[in-house]
Structures are given as structure tokens and as C-alpha cells.
Amino acid sequence: MNQSNKVIIDHLRCPDNMLQIAIVGELSGDSGFFNFGSDIICYGKCSAFAPSRTFRRPLHDALEYARVDHGAVSVPFNLSEVVETLRREKYTTAQWRVVRNWSQNRILRMGYYLARPFLPVSIRRHLQRLALRGWRKQPFPRWPVDTTVEQIFESIVGLILGERKDQTIPFIWFWPEGKRACALLTHDVETADGRDFCESLMDIDDSFGIKASFQVVPESRYKVPRTYLTSITQRGFEVNVQDLNHDGRLYDTYEKFQERTKAINEYAGLFKARGFRSALLNRDIDWLNLLAFEYDMSIPNVAHLDPQRGGCCTIFPYFVGGILEIPVTTTQDYTLFHILRDYSLNLWREQTSRIIERHGVINFIIHPDYVIADQEMQVFKYLLAYIAELRAKADLWIPLPRDLNEWWRQRSRMQIVKSGSGWKIVGEGRERARLAYARLENGKLVYDLSATATPPGEVE
């Protein structure tokens, strides 16, 4: 497989020969920002022009240099490189030439996290608002949901289908049984009060027919008796590891990370945990595969309101070596209540609607610690009712993270092959998979799961 093709083939799971992508010319020596269409910002090397060092000035448009010939598209950049640069947040070094915040100052950051356990929420949120000031002015990633990766894929597929009149591209639908989108409920347990509230929180989740994962801090924050972990798993919920001690220093240095991951990986076995999340969503994706987990949930889609700026610019899971990254695609409850001072569902509804529109994963972080009070609990119950309503009306899949992980791995190994005059899906889990079609409708790319889109005898 052509390496520029790989990233889009892996995402769609379509036949290799359906998406032929070539790089035109010699790529520039330096990476930078450029457009691919008027509203898509990319970062990488380009052969047609010198990319910009910042995204705060008019950018060259690489789409003007794209060509389609005999079903193959030629673009002046390496598609896989550009997409992986976004997913792995490699653009952030250049972004910091424009965006400066306290998280880049190691001494200030260390001082804050040393004091953090002794600071009441009222003081913490004031300091955090100061540190995050100006976030609304940042044009990239795009608030409140960034779908740059999906938009790039859609543009490439649209270019190819634009030349193949009245044709479709078959692919394996994103979610099992043809579900329209996916939603995860995850609970990060930060304090002893939050730990002690988990039993009540599970009762509330269960009252709406929704199961969640609990990310537990193994050391320092609170005691983690075996009976506590068992109380979660016996009720059909999931336990994952959250950091080591939640001091905000896991990623200070590579040596510190190596040292701490030895203990973290031991807790993976003790907790029988398949997933991991770092405290405060701190991260360095290049170090991720030192962790002995199947999946991680530490990278925000848009990180304007997190201590570490950036964002992976996608609403779908993706592999980082052997680990599956499941991005955080909605605003955390703490941020909504204490930074934005918003006690409505408006932002969560907007984010959810945009993600469902592109069939992605809606990943919520709700802390037991921050929904104990009456007002916050009422908002959380409204959210659960909203998710349950979408399950019925929008055909939403609401698995545990471990189930999403298992499905996405199975799907990554499935293939579409010719079957008579049509196609069939082969591979483990195919009985849950559905064949879908990408096609153009009035010049717009649409994904079709309907029976009318499937010619007779096409699915075995």
C-alpha cells in the first residue's frame, strides 16, 4: 500500500485500490501551516509553496494544486504525514510561536501542581481562568469540536468521486450493527470524596441504563481497597488506571516517565485494567507505547481549555503503535462548571450534534468529585437523560471503553473483498459489521447505509 494512502484506507477500511493518492513534486524542507480548501487548516510539508510558520495570516490553499486523473488524486503533500502530524499534535511547537500560556513554563507549572492539593476549588479556578485567558481568540484547533482530519478525508474522497460519475466507494461502517455514532461515559476519580460517591454515581448511571468506566488514581490521592474495585466491576462497570499519583508531573522528563510507568504498568495488572488516562490530560504521544495498556484516553480533540494546549483534531479513535487512542471530544464537567461557569447542556449539545453529524465518538469526562452538589448533579442527570434519548432517537451506541477498543481492533483487521458482482466483509467480527458506501449527492459527500444503496447480491 502507498504510504500516503495508508491513513485513509485504515480509517475507512475500503479496498486498497479505491483510493489512489500520489504526491506531486518535491516536498518542502520545513513544515508549516496551509489550507486544504477555505476552512481546513493543515500542518506539514508542501511541494507547491512554502507553508506558513503561523496560522494567523492568509494561508496558501493546497486544494488549488490537487488534480484527479483516471480515478487517482494528486496533492502537493503527504496525506498520511499531515494527518499523523495533527493526531500526534506535532504542530504545537509552531503554534506556541503564537499561543503562549503558563503550561509552557516548567517552573510555574511545577509550583502550581505542588500547591494544587492544598488549594480550594475557588482559588484554583481563578488561577486557571487567568492562565487560560485569550483562549477564545485561537483559530486552531477549531472550537468547540475540531474535525480537520475527517474534513481532509472527505475532501480526498470527494475529489475522487467527482471524476467517477455515478460511482460509490464501499467501506466498513464505523460502528457495529450500523449504529450512527458512539458515546462513552467516563468518570475520573480525583479525591476520597469522589471515591466514596462512586456507589451512588453508579446507581444514577444505572437508572438511565448507561454503564461507565472509572479511572482510579493508584497512589497518594486516596486508598484503593480491593473491595472498592470489585464493587465497580461486579456491577458491570469498568476500572481503568488514572496516572500514578495525579501530581501533574508524569510527563516532566522522559526519565521520570520511564520510572513511573513501571509502577503504572503494575497497577494495570492489579486493577485488571485495559485503559489509561493521564492526570490533567497531560501527554507526550511519543512515549505512549511504554504503557502496558490496550488503549489511552488522554488526548483532547481541542485543548484550548486544558493546561496543555493542542488537540488531535479528530473525533475518531486511532492507533499509536499498539495502543488505541480514544480522544476526549467534549468539554470536561469541571471546565464547564468552574471555568466557563455554565450550568446548562448547551455546549455539550452542540458538541454532541457536531460529532453525530460526522459519526464520531462522543467522549464525556464526568468526575464524581464535581457532581456531588445539587446544581451540578442536576446538570449531570439532564446529560444522562439526553444521552439516553439519543440512544433511542439517533441510534447511538453507548459501550464501555473496553468494548469500543475491542470493536475498533476487530474492524481494523476486517477487509472488503469482491463477491460476485458485489462486495463482502471478511474477518473476525464481520457479523456485527455493516457495508456502507461513500457517494456524492448534489456535489456533497454522503455516507450511505440504506438498503437502496446496496445493489442486489452485493453483501454476503
Image: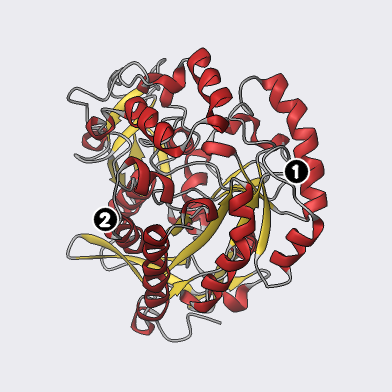
Q: Quadrant of residue 206?
A: bottom right
Identify the image's colour scheme: rainbow, by chain, secondary structure or one colour. secondary structure
Q: Amino acid at mark 1?
A: Ala
Q: For residue 209, which numbered disc appears in the image?
A: none
Residue neighbourhood size for the residue with mark 1, other residues' Cα within 10 Å, grouped as few (<14), some (14–19), many (≥20):
many
Residue 9 is left or right of residue 243, and the answer is left
Tell me residue 444's x, y (percent): 22, 60
Residue 190 is left or right of residue 302, and the answer is right
Seen from the viewer's position, the closer of residues 127 and 454 is 127
Q: Which quadrant would the C terminus be assigned to in this image?
A: bottom right
Seen from the viewer's position, the closer of residues 221 and 183 is 221
Residue 162 is left or right of residue 183, and the answer is left
| C-beta proximity under 8 Å, tags 1 and 2 | no
Report the label total. 2
Where 418 falls versus 330 (above or below)? Answer: below
**Can see residue 447?**
yes
Q: For residue 292, which numbered disc appears in the image?
A: 1
Q: Amino acid at mark 2?
A: Glu
Residue neighbourhood size for the residue with mark 2, other residues' Cα within 10 Å, grouped as few (<14), some (14–19), many (≥20):
some
Tell me residue 66's x, y (percent): 27, 38
Tell me residue 60's x, y (percent): 22, 27
Seen from the viewer's position, the closer of residues 126 and 210 is 126
Circle nearer the N terminus (1, 2): 2
Seen from the viewer's position, the closer of residues 410 and 279 is 279
Residue extending furthest toward the bottom: 456
- Helix, strand or loop at disc 2? helix
Residue designated by label 2: 163
The CA span between labels 1 and 2 is 46 Å
- Helix, strand or loop at disc 1? loop
Please name the residue shown 39% across and 24% down the image. Answer: 45
**Can see residue 76?**
no
Tell me residue 457's x, y (percent): 48, 85
